[in-house]
Structure formats: structure tokens, C-alpha cells
Amino acid sequence: MIEIWSSWCGPCVKNLPEVRKLHERLKGDPSTRFVSIAEDRSPERLQALFARSPGSSFPVLVAGEGIEPQTLPTTVILDREGYVREIRLGLGPGWVEDTLNSAEAVKKRLPVRFLR
């Protein structure tokens, strides 16, 4: 699972506590990996953001060129083979539970190699 966000995106920053909750729920699941990608090109800006909101426990990668989603935040759920199986745009009430349910549903789908 990949969460794409930015420190300049108000809804993204507001959602960081929910991202932390999601990451905490997924940490005990050996079949799911979680990483976030920040659209910020400046690690210093991210460090400043997390210094203001301690307790961040999820991995954050800094996006390179070419990762430019149309909507932030964007959640991408991949299957075991690395195929994108679902893209969730934005956030809303129940985001953590809905995202967890989507991830569980992806685990139960047939691998892409069987769909050809």
C-alpha cells in the first residue's frame, strides 16, 4: 500500500493522524507493507512538519520526478505481484476502515496472471 501526499496539501496534513492509525494497524500484518511518498522535493520541509507533530511512525519517501497524482492524498493498493489493483482518491469519514477493507479485498482477488 502506498499513500501519496504532500506537506503543502492541507487535507493531507490534516489526515496524517489517520495515516498513522492505518500504519499502526498494518504493522502486525506480515502480508501487507505500507509506505508513504511525499510530493515535497525538500526533505527539510518534511522534517520541519514532523518536528511539529511528533509521534510519526510511518515510512516516508520523498517523491522524485514523474510521481504527480491528480488528487492528493491518493492511496494505491497493489497486489503481491506488484500490480495496482485499486486507487483511492482523497479521504473522508471512515477512511482507515475503508482502506483496510479494500486491502483485504485485494488479497482475496485472483492473481493477475490468472486473469489473462
Image (cartoon, helix red, strand yellow):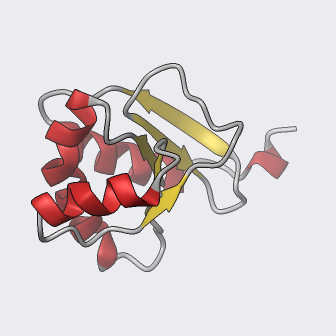
Give the total of numbered labels: 0
Above/below status of 66 relative to 32: above
User: Which residue ends up furthest to the top in the rendered image?
Assistant: 70
Q: Whole-percent x and y of residue 102?
A: 39, 43
Q: Is residue 62 found left or right of 8 in the rendered image?
A: right
Q: Residue drawn at (70%, 48%), measured in percent from left and top?
A: 83
Looking at the image, which residue is at 71% across and 52% down?
A: 111
Q: Residue 41: x and y, percent?
A: 53, 47
Decide which of 115, 11 is in the foreground and name it. Answer: 11
Q: What residue do we see at 69% from left, 41% from top? A: 65
Q: Is residue 95 above or below residue 103?
A: above
Which quadrant is home to the C terminus? top right
Residue 27 image-quadrant placement: bottom left
Relative to 43, 116 lies left or right: right
- Residue 12 percent location from the top left of the image: 27, 36
Residue 22, visible in the rendered structure: no
Q: Is residue 14 above or below residue 37?
A: above
How far across and down, in percent of the image, does residue 94 sit? 14, 36
Vertical placement of residue 59 versus 62, above or below: below
In this view, the residue in front, 58 or 109, is 58
Residue at image location 55% in from the left, 28% down from the top? 69
37 left or right of 114 in image: left
Q: Residue furthest right?
A: 116
**Which image quarter: residue 5?**
top left
Residue 72 visible in this rendered orientation of the protein: yes
